[in-house]
């Protein structure tokens, strides 16, 4: 299910990577990064089950990641809630979608770096 995104004209520039978004923007996914083909956006509640089915629960995908086995639904949800950004920040793991349909195809993210 495609989630409606804010258009570029509606996005507020967040400035520094660790600044918080305004509460009004947290109702819709915030676009973090775009390419001609892909959109990296904050996570929504609907994404949890999609990511579980598409990635974390798929043995063919998970054999190359983490412990090498699919995650149970509860473990995947805990992982997503702990490491994914739900709009309060633009750093952390986020949902990767393919344009134009907005279909979820994976995840990627930006992590803050204290070394710079």
Image: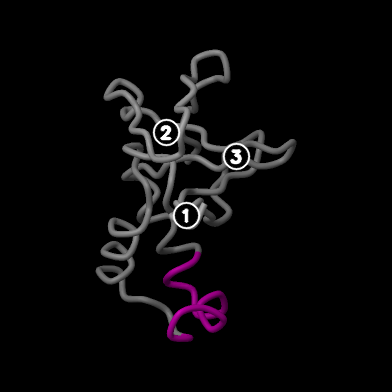
**Mark in front: 1 vs 2:** 1
Give the vertical position of 73 relative to 108 (above or below): below
Residue closest to the eye, 11 or 43: 11
Range covered by the magenta-colored residues: 55-68
Q: Residue at x 50, y 37 (%)?
A: 2
Residue 99: x, y in percent? 66, 37
- Report the Cα–Cα distance between label 1 and label 2: 24 Å
Give the vertical position of 84 relative to 58 (above or below): above
Q: Which mark is residue 54?
A: none
Q: Quadrant of residue 101?
A: top right
Q: Residue furthest right?
A: 36
Residue 37: x, y in percent? 72, 40
Residue 11: x, y in percent? 49, 20
Residue bearing the label numbered 2: 29
Q: Is residue 61 magenta?
A: yes
- Report the Cα–Cα distance between label 2 and label 3: 11 Å
Q: Relative to 98, is 41 on the left or the right?
A: left
- Report the Cα–Cα distance between label 3 and label 1: 22 Å
Residue closest to the eye, 39 or 73: 39
Check disc 2 and report its element: helix, strand or loop. loop
Nearer-N-terminus badge (2/3): 2
Residue 26: x, y in percent? 32, 30
Residue bearing the label numbered 1: 113
Give the vertical position of 64 relative to 113 (above or below): below
Q: Quadrant of residue 100?
A: top right
Residue bearing the label numbered 3: 39
**Mark in front: 3 vs 1:** 1
Q: Residue at x 44, y 51 (%)?
A: 112
Counting labels gives 3
Residue closest to the eye, 116 or 106: 116
């Amino acid at each position: 299910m495609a989630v409606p995104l804010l258009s570029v004209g509606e996005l507020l520039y967040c400035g520094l990577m660790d600044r918080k978004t305004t509460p009004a923007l947290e109702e819709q996914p915030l676009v973090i990064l775009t390419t001609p083909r892909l959109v990296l956006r904050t996570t929504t509640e609907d994404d949890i089950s999609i990511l579980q089915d598409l990635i974390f629960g798929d043995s063919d995908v998970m054999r190359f990641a983490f412990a090498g086995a699919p995650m149970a639904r509860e473990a995947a949800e805990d992982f997503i809630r702990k490491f994914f950004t739900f709009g309060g920040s633009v750093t952390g793991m986020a949902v990767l979608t393919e344009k134009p349909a907005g279909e979820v195809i994976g995840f990627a993210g930006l992590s803050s770096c204290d070394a710079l």
